[in-house]
Image (cartoon, rainbow, N blue to C red):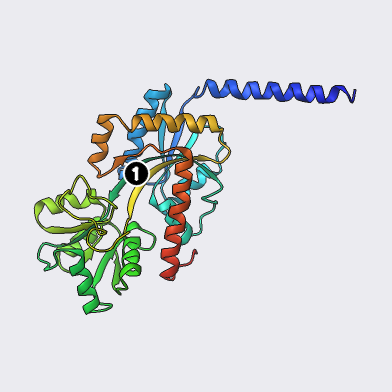
């Protein structure tokens, strides 16, 4: 009997492997859920729905967007962290995912409870924006004004942990300026405050500020991304304006629960990379100031680690600790 036991165990192991391989080959055989941890209508939601439609066509199963907003994206992320790693639940993540560990202690481990699938798209960048009546024409003008009156220049933000807040903190740590951050509940209020002259500078996402730039009520002086935006090709980057290495922009990525079968992760990653090259997708994303990426799982994991480390250093220097 003892001699037979290793043989039986080997046969069981082989059968389990065959069963797992067969299941993965038939994947997917039912609808897939994409958890979007933000309200419907934002660029994260819209981008997620666009890729969901394309992926659905590619894999032959419905892909359902499930909006689970709250706690700066932590509620939706926690749902996915605790979901079964069977390849039927994924997280559409954005910049909040890599910021939160340094501001709001999440109920999950962002580095160990997830497996990267792909960075879907990069952007939109933030836009350094002033009133059309402002004398400032570029970032150096803004910095000079801040240095001339330390602690008096006002920047509108969306509160701690938001990408505009991070942009201001990165600008502070890069230049040594001291400014006042004025939090608003939404981009519309922040933009109105600059138009009305109550606040001097705002760092909005590109899509929300474009109508105001077109109307002439606001002026863009720089974009926060490493390269110029196709939506504002005549506006220089902050790095071009003299702050080398300055780079902050949103992104949209896809994460799976940790231990999701590698074959499934790689299959979806390959589909996203293929979809990223489709001209109609490029055009749709361009409307939001975004560009398709389609990275590998390893690249997505590395990107997540690097971004968490980057913003942890910036916020730690600014005196923030996770609460």
Tell me where residue 280 sits by quadrant: top left
- Residue found at x 30% / y 43%: 41
Q: Is residue 284 above or below residue 155?
A: above
Where is 301 relative to 72, above or below?
Answer: above
* Residue picked out by circle 1: 44
Q: Describe residue 22's horizontal placement relative to residue 283 as left or right.
A: right
Q: Nearer the viewer, residue 250 or 141?
A: 141
- Residue drawn at x 38%, y 46% is 38
Foreground residue, 235 or 165? Answer: 235
Q: Is residue 66 left or right of residue 110?
A: left
110 up-or-down from 83: above or below = below
Percent coordinates x, y for residue 17 in the rendering:
65, 24
Q: Does 193 sit above or below residue 252? A: below
Quarter of the image for the N terminus: give it.
top right
Looking at the rendered structure, the secondary structure element under dot 1 is: helix
| Coordinates of residue 211 in the picture (x, y in percent) | 15, 49
Q: Residue at x 39, y 26 (%)?
A: 56
x%, y% of residue 47? 32, 39
């Amino acid at each position: 009997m003892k001699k037979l036991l290793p043989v039986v165990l080997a046969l069981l192991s082989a059968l389990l492997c065959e069963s797992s391989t067969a299941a993965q080959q038939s994947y997917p055989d039912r609808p897939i859920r994409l958890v979007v941890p933000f309200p419907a209508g934002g660029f994260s939601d819209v981008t997620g729905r666009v890729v969901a439609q394309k992926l659905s066509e590619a894999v032959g199963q419905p892909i359902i967007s499930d909006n689970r907003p709250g706690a700066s994206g932590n509620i939706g992320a926690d749902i996915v962290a605790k979901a079964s790693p069977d390849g039927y639940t994924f997280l559409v993540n954005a910049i909040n995912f890599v910021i939160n560990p340094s501001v709001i202690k999440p109920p999950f481990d962002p580095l160990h409870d997830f497996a990267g699938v792909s960075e879907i798209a990069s952007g939109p960048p933030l836009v350094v924006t002033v009133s059309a009546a402002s004398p400032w024409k570029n970032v150096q003008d803004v910095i000079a004004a801040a240095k001339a009156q330390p602690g008096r220049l006002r920047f509108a933000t969306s509160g701690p942990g938001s990408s505009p807040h991070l942009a201001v903190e990165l600008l502070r740590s890069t230049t040594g300026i001291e400014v006042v951050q004025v939090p608003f509940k939404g981009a519309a209020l922040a933009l109105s405050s600059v138009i009305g002259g109550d606040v001097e500078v705002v760092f909005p996402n590109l899509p929300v500020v474009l109508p105001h730039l077109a109307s002439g009520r606001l002026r863009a002086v720089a974009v926060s991304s490493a390269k110029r935006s196709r939506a504002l090709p005549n506006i220089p980057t902050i790095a071009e304006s003299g702050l080398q290495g300055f780079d902050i922009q949103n992104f949209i990525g896809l994460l799976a629960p940790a231990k999701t079968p590698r074959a499934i992760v790689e299959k979806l990653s390959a589909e996203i990379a293929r979809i990223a090259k489709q001209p109609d997708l490029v055009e749709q994303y361009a409307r939001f100031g975004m560009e398709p990426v389609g990275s590998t799982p390893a690249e997505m994991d590395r990107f997540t680690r690097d971004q968490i480390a980057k913003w942890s250093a910036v916020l730690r220097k600014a005196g923030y600790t996770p609460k």
